[in-house]
Amino acid sequence: METKVMNCIMCPMGCEMTVTMEHGKFISVTGNTCPRGAKYAEQEVTDPKRMLTTTVRVHGGLLPLLPVVSADVLPKGRVKDCVDCLRRVEVQAPVQAGDVVVKDILGLGVDILASRDMESVVS
């Protein structure tokens, strides 16, 4: 048996939880005050996921970079690969918040979306 101590991030209480695992499998969690904490702890030790927020280059925009966000969580171990992929992306202004910048990034089933409007430079 192995244990891991972590703080829950699902609400402002920040419960300190102890997760028990055996042979890499989740067994139990203690210290959480609500079911959301238990669910978070199990996912965090078995299949951690993260949202991605970063920027991509914009051609013809008022600013050189466009903030983007993942439409859903991504596997934590693939976030760096997604950032590396987005370094090669350049969008053409104008762009509207919510526009899909990259569809199904790296085949993970998650779209990357513009998180703000970007007007084009007016000549």
Image (cartoon, grey):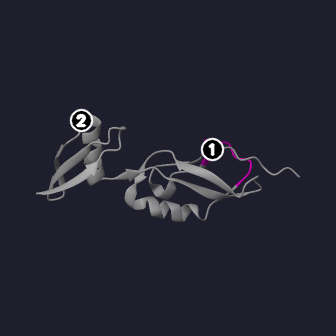
> Residue 99, which numbered label?
1
Tell me the mark number nearer the camera, choosing from 2 and 1: 2
- Asked if residue 122 lies in the magenta stretch, the reply is no
* SS at badge 1: loop
- Asked if residue 97 lies in the magenta stretch, the reply is yes
Q: Residue furthest top?
A: 34
Does 90 sit above or below residue 67?
below
> Residue 33, which numbered label?
2
- Compare marks 2 and 1 and give the one earlier in the sequence: 2
**Predominant secondary structure, magenta span:** loop
Q: Position of residue 121 (x, y in %)?
A: 81, 52
Does 116 sit above or below residue 76?
above
Q: Is residue 80 left or right of residue 61?
A: left
Q: Is residue 112 visible?
A: no
Does 32 sit above or below residue 64?
above
Q: Position of residue 87 (x, y in %)?
A: 59, 64
Is there CB contact under 8 Å for labels 2 and 1?
Answer: no
Q: Position of residue 64 (x, y in %)?
A: 71, 58
Q: Residue at x 77, y 56 (%)?
A: 60
Q: Is residue 68 left or right of residue 44?
A: right
Q: Residue at x 42, y 52 (%)?
A: 74
- At label 1, counting other C-alpha atoms closer than 10 Å, the crowd grade (few under 14, some 14-19, many 20 or more) is some
Q: Which residues are magenta?
A: 92-100
- At label 2, counting other C-alpha atoms closer than 10 Å, the crowd grade (few under 14, some 14-19, many 20 or more) is some
Viewer-proximal residue, 99 or 67? 67
* SS at badge 2: loop
